[in-house]
Image: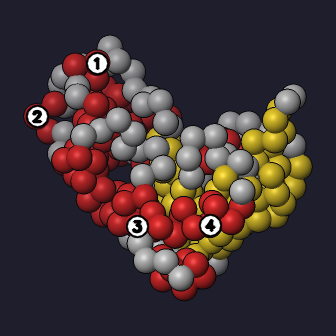
Amino acid sequence: MGYAIRTENLIKRYKDKTAVDGLTLSVEEGELIALLGVNGAGKTTTVKMLTCLTKPSGGKAEIMGIDISADPDGVKRLVGVSPQDTSVAENLTVKENLEFMTGIYLPADRTEAVVSRAIESFGLGEFSNKKAKLLSGGYKRKLSIAMAIIGEPKVLFLDEPTLGLDVLARRQLWREIEALKKDMTIVLTTHYMEEAQALADRIVIMNEGSVMAVGTLDELENMTGKKGLEDVFVSIAERME
């Protein structure tokens, strides 16, 4: 099995800030990694670069062997993204949102089957003819993720997928994300420690645009001598101060 994502010294600078500073990372096909950090750590900017929504200022990155700078259109055909700000068409129904996305990525003769499968997989059946603006926050997030995978991406980016959800809605969405792992590589950004601990094969701890540590929870615990991700995170963060 090869690498789904490879980055080398990836950098994003704005006028007065370096948002991502020398990110070097390899992610295997089928792996779920969590980018963990407080707000402003560089997680969302990393996702925007890897999905070709913003150009890097330096370094390089590949998605399934395709260079993000040399062939951004090729990369976009391989990735799906559910952004931090839930991206759904508020005045379209759940079904219409999914049909619209399917029309972009797949042949027309597959629309009905693919949309039906997505509605069933995410438990959206009773809401299929309801306008998206009438959904709860949790169901909007489900719809956003369903729209992100409708084109059958090789790599899925979920940017703060449970932000603002209550505990029950968050746990339900975790189960949906867990079920996707067998079909695609997933990059999950979060600042919830328990989310990263529950879902990720490996955890990337970021702060102020830099990678502070990478590893499984066991590896990070061994590195710091701490138990539990929260204590691990605090220990690593304090060392960097």
Q: How many labels, in total?
A: 4
| Residue behind mark 2 | 126
- Structural distance between the alpha carbons of marks 4 and 1: 41 Å
Residue farthest toward the top in the current orientation of the protein: 91
Which residue is nearer to you in this view: 225 or 189?
225
Q: Residues within 10 Å of mark 3 (few under 14, many from 20)?
A: some
Badge 1 or badge 3: first in the primary sequence: 1
| Residue behind mark 4 | 236
**Nearer to us: label 2 or label 1:** 1
Disc 2 is placed on an element classified as helix
Disc 3 is placed on an element classified as helix
Residue at horizontal 81%, vertical 41%?
18
**Nearer to us: label 3 or label 2:** 3
- Structural distance between the alpha carbons of marks 3 and 2: 32 Å
Say the numbered circle drawn on residue 133. Answer: 1
**Nearer to us: label 2 or label 4:** 4
Badge 4 or badge 1: first in the primary sequence: 1
Give the x, y percent position of residue 24: 76, 65
Badge 2 or badge 4: first in the primary sequence: 2
Vertical placement of residue 203 versus 22, above or below: below
Mark 3 and 4 residues: CB-CB less than 8 Å, in contact? no
Q: Residues within 10 Å of mark 2 (few under 14, many from 20)?
A: few
**Residue 66 occupies quadrant:** bottom right
Q: Amino acid at mark 2?
A: Glu
Residue at horizontal 62%, vertical 66%?
236
Badge 3 or badge 2: first in the primary sequence: 2
- Structural distance between the alpha carbons of marks 1 and 3: 32 Å
Residue at horizontal 35%, vertical 28%?
97
Q: In the displayed structure, does residue 9 sit left or right of residue 175?
A: right
